Amino acid sequence: MTEQKNELYQEIEAWAQNAILHSPTWSINQLDYSEKSISVVEIIIGELAEKNFSIPEEQLNMIAQEYGCYLLLTAQKLYGGEFYWNEELEQPMLICCEPQAAIVLLTWNKVKGRLLGDEADHLAFFLEGFAEATKNPENGSQIVYL
């Protein structure tokens, strides 16, 4: 792993740890980077979405980044892949299944959409689709989940 990739991994890991530290007490032991923990994140973000009208924009962005990184790290532990920085969207991404395919996961916007109350941005369903795509990637396919 190059030094730059290692630094990005450490940054993602630190943001994910912040998500755990800032989580409701009932959930902390359940945030263990397992598939089941993705549903726990969905519940936490759903609860926060009910209160989003009182959360400042800066804090919404921080929450989206923390839980987005938690989801990225969970996906990487479960399905493999490498982290890269997406310059255009200014956020980290996970790319799986290289070199035969590129299945890309970006999470910050999805978490923020859910925080803003968009139930179509269901996080567990979103990650389930990504997981399915990584299991049997079609040669040459390029799929982006954002």
Image (cartoon, grey):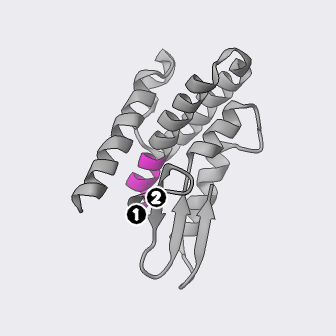
Q: Does the magenta-highlighted stretch encompass residue 74?
A: yes
Quadrant of residue 124 in the image? top right
Residue at figure coordinates x 56%, y 53% from the top left: 89
Type of amino acid under label 2: Leu
Q: Is residue 42 left or right of residue 35?
A: right
Question: Where in the figure is residue 85, as x and y percent of width and height?
Answer: 43, 56
Q: Nearer the viewer, residue 27 or 92?
A: 92
Q: Are marks 2 and 1 in contact (CB under 8 Å)?
A: yes
Question: Where in the figure is residue 34, as x and y percent of width and height?
Answer: 44, 44
Dot 2 falls on a residue whose secondary structure is strand
Quadrant of residue 31 in the image? top left
Type of amino acid under label 1: Gly
Q: Nearer the viewer, residue 110 or 133?
A: 110
Q: Which mark is residue 71?
A: none
Q: Which residue is mark 2?
A: 94
Q: Does the magenta-highlighted stretch encompass residue 1?
A: no
Total count of labels: 2
Question: Where in the figure is residue 118, as x and y percent of width and height?
Answer: 77, 37
Label 2 Cα neighbours within 10 Å, binned few <14 / some 14-19 / many ≥20: many
Q: Which residue is mark 1?
A: 81
In the rendered view, tell whether residue 138 sits above or below residue 34. below
**Between discs 2 and 1, the one toward the N terminus:** 1
In the rendered view, tell whether residue 141 sits above or below residue 26. below
Quarter holding the N terminus? bottom left
Question: Where in the figure is residue 51, as x and y percent of width and height?
Answer: 70, 17
